[in-house]
Amino acid sequence: MSEDVLDQFGTLLMEWVRDWSIENLDSIIRGKVKGREQKALKKLFETLPSGSQDALERLVPIAVDTTLHYFLWLIEENPNIDLVMKTPDGIQSVKNESDGLSGELYTSNGWIAKFSKQRSGDNEIT
């Protein structure tokens, strides 16, 4: 049952947080988002040297994955925080089903590889 809970949570985290974050940040870099702050960023990006957009796009998944890593690490290391999911069998602790939540992101069998539709930054935090 533990893998089911971990995979359910990993799927949600990758689709709703990682993929959407990368997609949104890419849209900002490419100037496709029309908010006031995004327009200001677009002007700033236009002043950068050639190739900077590529560098920013390469940085996006690394920044998102680093944030996810430290968020999951906070949950796993703090005894006052738990992460639970409702399942047909009741409420289950995702935290207790993993031997290290932040590590669930990585490797060829990790959440990023299995459930994310966005590119990888190949950034494993140690």
Image: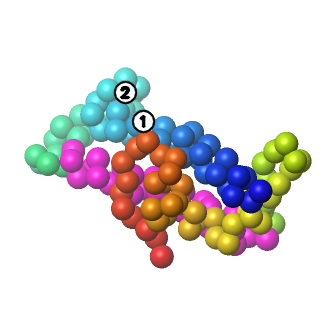
Q: What residue type is disc 1 on?
A: Asn
Q: Is any part of residue 74 visible from this angle? A: no
Q: Does the magenta run of residues contain 43?
A: no
Q: Contact, CB < 8 Å: mark 2 with mark 1?
A: yes
Query: Which residue, as the protein is rendered here, is positioned at the far top?
Result: 34
Image mark for residue 75: none
Check disc 1 and report the residue beneath it: 24
Q: Position of residue 35 (x, y in %)?
A: 41, 26
Check disc 2 and report the residue beneath it: 33
Which residue does the image show at 78% across and 48% down from the upper left?
85
Q: Does the magenta run of residues contain 75?
A: yes
Q: Position of residue 100 (x, y in %)?
A: 64, 70
Q: How many marks?
A: 2
- Would you place residue 59 above or below residue 47 in this image? below
Tell which of 80 and 16 is nearer to you.
16
Q: What residue type is disc 2 on?
A: Val
Tell which of 89 and 14 is nearer to you.
89
Asked where in the image residue 46 lies, by quadrant, the reply is top left
Which residue does the image show at 45% across and 62% down from the upper left?
108
Asked where in the image residue 92 lies, by quadrant, the reply is bottom right
Q: Is any part of residue 109 visible from this angle? A: yes
Count residues near mark 1 (Cα–Cα under 10 Å), then give few for <14, some for 14-19, many for 20+. some
Q: Which range of residues does the magenta coloring cover?
A: 53-79
Mark 2 / mark 1, whichever is N-terminal? 1
Q: Secondary structure at mark 1?
A: helix
Q: Nearer the viewer, mark 2 or mark 1?
A: 1
Q: Position of residue 73 (x, y in %)?
A: 62, 67
Which residue does the image show at 69% across and 58% down from the upper left?
3
Q: Secondary structure at mark 2?
A: loop
Is residue 115 found left or right of 54 in the rendered image?
right
Tell which of 119 and 79 is nearer to you.
119
CA gap, disc 2 to disc 1?
8 Å
